[in-house]
Each structure stands twice: as C-alpha cells, then as structure tokens.
Amino acid sequence: MESLAIAIAQHGYSILFTLVLLEALGFPIPAALAILTAGAASAHGPMHPVLSPATALAALFIGDTSLYLLGRYTGWWTLRMLCILSLNPDTCILRSADVFFKRGKIVLLFAKFLPGVNTMAAPLAGSMNMKFGQFFRYDLGGALLYAVVYSTIGYVFSDFLGAMTKSYIQFGHYLGRTLAILFAGYLAWRAWIVIRQRRVGTVNGVTALEVSRNSGQFAVFDVRSHGYYDKGAKRIRGSARLEPNAIGNAALDFPKDKKIVLYCT
C-alpha cells in the first residue's frame, strides 16, 4: 500500500510539472487547473502540500527562463511565434510590449494572472535586454506567488474539488492523447497561417545602399519599439521616429511623392 501511494505521488508530480511547463512555454494548457487540483490532492494524501507548489514553481521558472533566453537571442521572432495563435500577431506583439513598457519590471510579478501577457512577459524581458539578475528576482517572485495562491486555494477548498482530486491521476492517462491532439491542431493552424500570408503577399525589401544612393526618393522611418529605442539611440541619418502603434493611424501625413521605408532593430 505504501509503495502504491509513493507511485501515485510520483506520477502526480510528473503530470503537474509537464502541464505547468507546457503552459509556461506557450501551449494552451490549463496549468492553473492542474495546480488547483494538486493542491486539493495535497489535502487528501496523494500529494504533498509543499512539494506540489514547489514542483509548479520549478516548471514555471524553467519555462520562463527558456523564453527569456529565446527572447534575448532571437528577439521578435520568438514573440511572433508565441503570438501566432492571435488573429493579428503583429498587434499582439506591440500591445504586449506597450503593457510591459508602461508597467515595467513589476509586470513580471503579476503576469501569470493576466491572460495574453503571462506567456509574453518573459521573452519580452529578454528581447528588451533586461539583466538576468533582475529578471530572476521578479520572475521568481511572480512564479512563487502564482504557484502558492492556486495551491492554497486548492488545499483550502479541497472538499469542493473532490471530484477533481479523484480524477487527477486518471487524467494522466489521457495526457499523451490530449497533447497529441493539441499539437496536431497547432500544426494545422500554423499551416493555415502560412497559406493566408502567401495570399496576402510579401512586403518589398530595399537595401541600405539603395536608400543611400537614392535618398531623395525615399522617406525613411525608424519604427523600433519600446526597449530598443531611447534618447541616446542612433538613427539612420534623415530618418524620422515613428511609434509602431501609430502606423495604422489615418491621421499620419506620409509623403505622397516618395516611397516609404520602415526599419527596426
């Protein structure tokens, strides 16, 4: 009986870690529900009230750190990949960047509770060159708050979550199938996005040398977003600053007799 309990506890922790890690990496997985259920299970024996939130905390921090590093070394590519499920990926990136810029590093403390920002906060911190030590403190604090709050709620209200507790271990049997279906759906969605973008067409590119040789034919705008631009930042000579969120503003007076060139980082 003791060995069975140990086996159940070990199996439960692996499920919890997997679900929370996948959500932290951007997959549409209900990690909060898993933490709640683990908290309820802690009140009835199969799981430990300290090891459960610790497991969730480890998964959250590993996932966040991975996205932070990806954001730091790949920049907007990672953000675009995470926003691909949005109806408008570019708006998703700019909106998240705007929230991060206005609230600053404090966003990392509460990002896990904000749908749409929870996955974006870590890679945004990396892409905006936040120091790792600073990211470590704030993100660890936010992950700890998230894990403890949901684990505590599950533990305190375990009687109401009894059905969830009983089905928690059984849910692990369906985890593989569920993830396979979600992954297949994700690939199908990506394929649809690629097909749609091909129909729209690509934006014409221009080389820096061509712009330099024919400067009178081009109006050049610097559209670097928050974190990539400050008062001391260097710009292409003759270019004008244009906030990315304002590109769709109909009131903007673009020159009619010149080709428009936009550049970022």
Image (cartoon, rainbow, N blue to C red):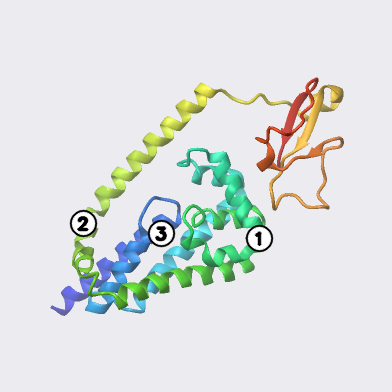
Question: In x, y percent, where is residue 60?
Answer: 45, 64
Q: Residue furthest left?
A: 1
Using residue 22 as the reference point, say whether residue 243 is left or right of it: right
The image quadrant that residue 108 belongs to is bottom right
Q: Amino acid at mark 3?
A: Leu
Question: In x, y percent, where is residue 73?
Answer: 61, 50
Say whether residue 209 is visible.
Answer: no
Say whether residue 61 is visible.
Answer: yes
Disc nearer the start of the sequence (2/3): 3
Q: Amino acid at mark 1?
A: Met
**Residue at 55% across, 44% down:** 92
Q: Is residue 221 above or below residue 22?
A: above
Q: Are marks 2 and 1 in contact (CB under 8 Å)?
A: no
Q: Which mark is residue 130?
A: 1
Q: Which residue is mark 3?
A: 21
Q: Which mark is residue 173?
A: 2
Disc nearer the start of the sequence (2/1): 1
Q: Residue furthest top?
A: 257
Q: Is residue 71 above or below residue 257?
A: below
Real-space Cα separation, disc 3 to disc 1, in angstroms: 22 Å
Using residue 197 as the reference point, say whether residue 97 is left or right of it: right
Q: Are marks 2 and 3 in contact (CB under 8 Å)?
A: no
Give the quarter of the figure containing the C terminus: top right
The image quadrant that residue 246 belongs to is top right
